[in-house]
Image: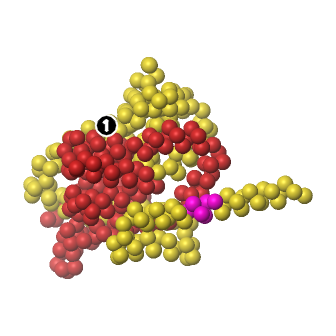
């Protein structure tokens, strides 16, 4: 039972004090779980993170669930997840209440008039960085362009676009898988 | 009714949200601004700024905020829980049954194929926020400070990887002194 509480407080601390979202939380989780508490060996941790990263959903929650489950089963998973999200919920509830109260004040409105265009830039920049890291070529550039065109211009629901993309990627992943198997076979045969 | 809608919307986002908080942002924007009109595009932009400056996972921050706006305290808890629900199911069943190294490489390849489309999704979300509500007097020539802020923040973020929180604070200061 003690370990369940420890899990809760470890993730609570990370959830309460890490700015910058799920990926920033990851290095804090590593420090706590691998280095300090030594709950999970480093190589196993990173192997699992590679898989957890490719799953949909909240990355920090997936990580907390996996770490909690690995260390203390179901109770551990729930404790770690609650620890990771409760600080967010409390802080946002407080801020949202305050912000809705004071939003119409001229000072607040002036500040947010400056912030809104910055938010747009902070959304556009990582999407372009993502295209760069995905190694998009002139041939595959059609995929992001089509996605932008469909959602922004044709007002197609992003839900439909992402489902179509999942179907396409699944075919791609299966083909890659087969190719890898075939080359492995060829290498095995003399 | 509002609770059922919140539950359905955020379960959907939890299932389809590949690629982290920003990918979810475009899904949330579509449901919250276009589909259900729980928020205006301005409120949405403000919410994104607040979610980014607050500690914790950005998508949980956004879910809590949307839930609170649409359905009060109960709505905020429900939205955050709904967003986590698919993850809970996945970690219990999928990770235990299928997540060995072999199917792990399938998932990694799947995400690799998905990445360009997700990037497009995020870019579209940014584009649709570039409107008259978020950009003060856009195109009128006399006051293009919004565009200047956007371009400078983009350059700082894309080329110099500037801290997003710092950029938000700075542009808030610019807004305070200019408007």
Please give the name of the residue rendered at 24% of the width and 60% of the height, measured from the top-left corner.
Answer: B36
Quadrant (top left, top right, bottom left, bottom right) of the C terminus of chain B: bottom left
* Label 1 Cα neighbours within 10 Å, binned few <14 / some 14-19 / many ≥20: many
| Res A190 quadrant in image | bottom right
Q: Which residue is situated farthest in the right direction here? A: A190
Chain A colour in the picture: yellow
Q: Is residue B126 above or below residue B63?
A: below
Q: Which chain is red?
A: B
Q: Is residue B92 left or right of residue A124?
A: right
Please give the name of the residue rendered at 40% of the width and 73% of the height, measured from the top-left corner.
Answer: A150
Q: Is residue B154 above or below residue B52?
A: below
Asked whether residue A128 is drawn in magenta, I would say: no
Position in image of residue A101 (x %, y %)? 11, 48
Position in image of residue A31 (x %, y %)? 49, 35
Please give the name of the residue rendered at 21% of the width and 75% of the height, measured from the top-left corner.
Answer: B138
Q: In this view of the protein, which residue sits in the foreground, B164 or B57?
A: B57
Q: Which residue is situated farthest in the top direction here? A: A2
Callout 1: chain: A
Q: In this view of the protein, which residue sits in the foreground, A164 or A151?
A: A164
Q: Is residue A95 left or right of residue B158?
A: left
Q: In this view of the protein, which residue sits in the foreground, A93 or B93?
A: B93
Q: Which residue is mark 1?
A: A87
| Res A43 quadrant in image | top right
Asked whether residue A171 is drawn in magenta, I would say: yes
Please give the name of the residue rendered at 37% of the width and 49% of the height, measured from the top-left corner.
Answer: B11
Tell me if residue B169 can be seen.
Answer: no
Question: What segment is highlighted magenta in the picture?
Answer: A169-174
Q: In this view of the protein, which residue sits in the foreground, B172 or B84?
A: B84
């Amino acid at each position: 039972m003690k370990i369940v509480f420890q899990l809760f407080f470890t993730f609570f601390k990370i959830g309460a004090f890490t700015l910058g979202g799920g990926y920033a939380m990851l290095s804090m989780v590593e420090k706590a779980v691998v280095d300090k508490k030594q709950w999970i060996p480093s190589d196993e941790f990173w192997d699992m993170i590679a898989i957890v990263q490719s799953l949909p959903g909240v990355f920090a929650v997936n990580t907390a669930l996996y770490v909690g489950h690995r260390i203390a089963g179901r109770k551990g998973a729930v404790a770690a997840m609650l620890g990771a999200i409760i600080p967010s919920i409390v802080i946002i509830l407080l801020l949202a209440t305050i912000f809705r109260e004071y939003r119409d004040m001229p000072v607040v409105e002036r500040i947010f008039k400056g912030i809104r265009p910055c938010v747009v830039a902070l959304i556009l920049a990582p999407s372009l960085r993502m295209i760069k890291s995905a190694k998009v070529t002139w041939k595959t550039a059609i995929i992001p362009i089509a996605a932008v065109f469909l959602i922004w211009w044709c007002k197609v629901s992003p839900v439909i676009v992402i489902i179509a993309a999942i179907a396409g990627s699944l075919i791609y992943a299966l083909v890659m898988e087969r190719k890898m198997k075939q080359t492995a076979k060829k290498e095995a045969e003399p | 009714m509002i609770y059922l809608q919140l539950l359905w919307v955020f379960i959907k986002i939890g299932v389809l949200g590949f690629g982290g908080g920003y990918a979810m942002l475009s899904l949330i924007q579509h449901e919250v601004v276009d589909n259900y009109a729980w928020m205006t595009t301005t409120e949405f932009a403000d919410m994104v700024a607040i979610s980014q400056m607050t500690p914790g996972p950005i998508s949980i921050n956004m879910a809590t905020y949307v839930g609170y706006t649409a359905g009060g305290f109960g709505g905020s808890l429900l939205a955050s829980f709904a967003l986590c629900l698919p993850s809970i199911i996945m970690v219990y069943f999928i990770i235990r049954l299928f997540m060995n190294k072999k199917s792990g490489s399938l998932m990694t390849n799947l995400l690799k194929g998905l990445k360009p489309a997700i990037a497009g999704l995020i870019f579209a979300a940014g584009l649709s926020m570039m409107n008259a509500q978020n950009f003060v007097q856009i195109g009128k020539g006399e006051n293009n400070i919004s565009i200047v802020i956007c371009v400078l923040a983009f350059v700082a973020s894309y080329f110099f990887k500037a801290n997003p929180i710092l950029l938000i604070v700075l542009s808030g200061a610019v807004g305070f002194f200019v408007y």
